[in-house]
Amino acid sequence: MAAMGWMVRVGPAAILLAAAGCRDLQIEPVKIEIADLAVAPCDTNILLSLPPNERKVNCYEVQGTAFNPSTRELRKVNLYGVIEDAEGTIVREGRIGSLPDLGQGKKIPFLVRVFFTQKLREPLKLDAFRAKGLT
């Protein structure tokens, strides 16, 4: 029976920090509270700012608030969720967009534009939205 081992990928920055004695460095995801979600079609002027060959897309704005309950500043915040059409068909799942950095204990409003190539049956439903950021 072959021996089983673990392989862990470590980036160059982590190797340099470990070599310099920075063993207390924490890079761990922090769950962010998402609330007040709403979705609406984008203003048509948004599409006019796109190149002519890209104006055939359908744009929606996902709005809400994000709250960082931790005592640490969060960077590289990503928003994830499920968007369904009026018939319950999933039209987008996974990463929806990014949010600005969040200070400790801060609550901020956000707006993320989501583009679709197909026409969607409205109203759209937002489900299982969550966000994670790194310290």
Image (tube, helix red, strand yellow):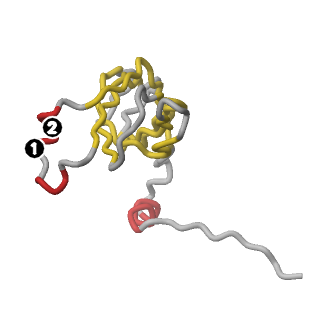
Given the image, on which type of amino acid does mark 2 rest?
Answer: Ile
Name above or below for residue 80 compared with residue 33: below
Q: Residue drawn at (52%, 41%), measured in percent from left and top?
A: 90
Q: Is residue 50 at least partly visible in the picture?
A: yes
Q: Which residue is mark 1?
A: 49
Q: Is residue 26 at least partly visible in the picture?
A: no
Residue 9 on image: x %, y %: 54, 67
Q: Residue furthest top?
A: 36
Residue 19 on image: x %, y %: 44, 65
Q: Which residue is mark 2?
A: 46
Q: Nearer the viewer, residue 56 or 10?
A: 56
Residue 81 on image: x %, y %: 49, 37
User: What element does badge 1 sit on?
Assistant: loop
Name above or below for residue 88 compared with residue 27: above
Q: Distance from label 2 to label 1 (Cα)? A: 5 Å
User: What element does badge 2 sit on?
Assistant: helix
Residue 73 on image: x %, y %: 36, 33
Q: Residues within 10 Å of mark 2 (few under 14, many from 20)?
A: few
Q: Which mark is residue 16?
A: none
Q: Residues within 10 Å of mark 1 (few under 14, many from 20)?
A: few
Q: Residue drawn at (42%, 34%), measured in percent from left and top?
A: 121
CB under 8 Å between discs 2 and 1: yes
